[in-house]
Image: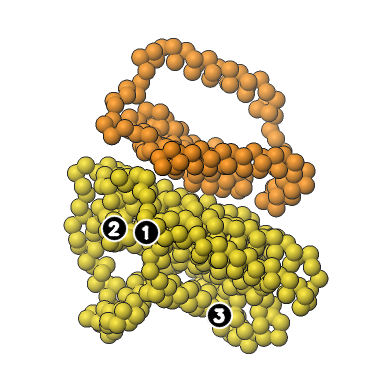
Amino acid sequence: MTATFLILAVLTVAGTAAAMGLRNAVHCVLALTVGFAGVAALYLQLDAQFVGLTQIMVYVGAVAILAVFAIMMTHSPTPVPIPAYSTRWALGGVVAAAVFAVLAWAICSSSASSQILPPQPDINVQQIGEALMHQYVLPLEIMGLLLTAALIGAVVIAMDRKEEIK
Amino acid sequence: MIQTLDQIFVLAKLWLLGYVPAVAQPLASAILSVVPILIAFPLLFAITTWLERKGLGRMQNRLGPNRTGPFGLLQPIADAIKSLTKEDIVPVTADHLVHFLAPLVLVMAAFLAYAVLPIGRNMVLVNMNAGVLFFFAIGSTVELSVFMAGWSSRSKYSLLGAMRAVAQMISYEVPMVLATIVIIMQAGSLSTVTIVDKQAGYTGIFPHWFVFTPWGFMGFALFMIAATAESNRSPFDLPEGESEIIAGYYIEYSGFKFALFFLGEYLGMFATSGLAITLFLGGWSAPFSFLTWIPSYAWFFAKLLILIGAFIWIRGTLPRLRMDQLMNLAWQYVLPMALINMLVAGIWHFMPGGLLRWLVCTALLAAPCVLLSLALKRKKRLQVRTYYFAE
């Protein structure tokens, strides 16, 4: 456990924790962005450049902006005070503890945690690209089709509204 | 001698590192690489503000700054002192922490982008094998800082400006990345250093820059359009339209924070210009084979200054676009052209070299370019506008 890892881990955990605890929705998104950036930095620290940079590009650059826009478009002008903590915190605590227990049990009992893995070969972006274009080209195309369908769907929804106003 | 001059900064760094104990060497090496960037580019920013004010002044038939020093050359220093000594006013209703953080995030992101730019031979901070990807990933965090600035000020103008800026940046990021893809296809690498290396060599006296191919030229043009929009400069300066929303997202900033926004914006412009140089204009390589004796970093900065000059020229010449024109240009012209350009780059790659390849690729690019321009022009139906959200 290096100092870099510790700093990044604290940053990530603090960011995501703040995202759950803060009252203002925009503050929550910004805190969550810190968490995203921390995770991306952790990937980069593990030499997973492609995953790390894509994490920044998609989550910090797109998802955070999308969330912020969604909040601003749907926010009522007079903010309704929503308590940050649910009254049924005991039930929530039980659920959280159960989830944590299951995850911890799964990690501890899996073979990956007990054995020390041999150093992985250095995987660069070119290899990822070649794998995507050769071995996994069909899933990639299906994903592309799905995203295009979603995009067209979004445009259609936006267009309907315009005609109604006319 | 020529080689020593070319590598003088690299040698100076190694010489200085010799005095540092071995334990501290990685840290000292990083600091010695970062500090020149932190000095050189803000200095260039200072020079550019003077150049811009002078250039715009001449274009508008005025003198521009001429009171401080010879030709007003000390104007940037006067500006710096002014912004440092000005009162820092924060609106009462503003979100203080976010308001404070926004300019810092912007400047930090702008500086980070320089990490992958090869400024000269062997002069790159980090030679990542995903350098171009890093550049765009860092660039996308700028949007967040713009939003932070606009939202935290609690002002309608700044929020409107931020909304405009973010919408514009997202729209133009897509064609920008797509214009870059042709270079990545040809170079077969995402590393900025490899991309510059692929453009090395000369035919006769002319270099093998990617801009001297049909797809490279088109890509360069599209990239520069998108880069102008990304850096919120005229004619795409709606986010800070002075006549409508005064200064956009940084209207509620004063003093040095305001200066930081300017710094961040110009640094972003230099960084995207630097990427354009790296991708299309051969990076630090000389434009003619008989000029290779001039140091590589000098060429990089010469090209950068030429691009900055072009930016200033455009700002002095073109009027501001309207929001719908801006979006139409992005989605109906720049984006389809970028996609066609990718196709042409593929055809170029698989066709045998020669005149035929040039003719076919140029025709394949020129025809859609003309057709799309005509379509964009015909779309301009002049009628009473209906406002959906402003009634």
B163, above or below B313, in the image: above
Q: Residues within 10 Å of mark 2 (few under 14, many from 20)?
A: few
When asked about the image quadrant of residue B179, the answer is: bottom right
Residue at 65% from the left image edge and 27% from the top image edge: A113
**Quick check: can you spot residue B121?**
no
Residue at 60% from the left image edge and 48% from the top image edge: A49
Q: Secondary structure at mark 3?
A: loop
In x, y percent, where is residue A62?
50, 44
Q: Colour of chain B?
A: yellow
In x, y percent, where is residue B8?
53, 76
Quick check: marks 1 and 3 in contact, CB under 8 Å?
no
Looking at the image, which is closer to me, B102 or B339?
B339
Chain identifier, colour orange: A
Type of amino acid under label 1: Leu
**In this rendering, do the residues under marks 3 and 2 share a single chain?**
yes
Q: Is residue B349 left or right of residue B101?
A: right
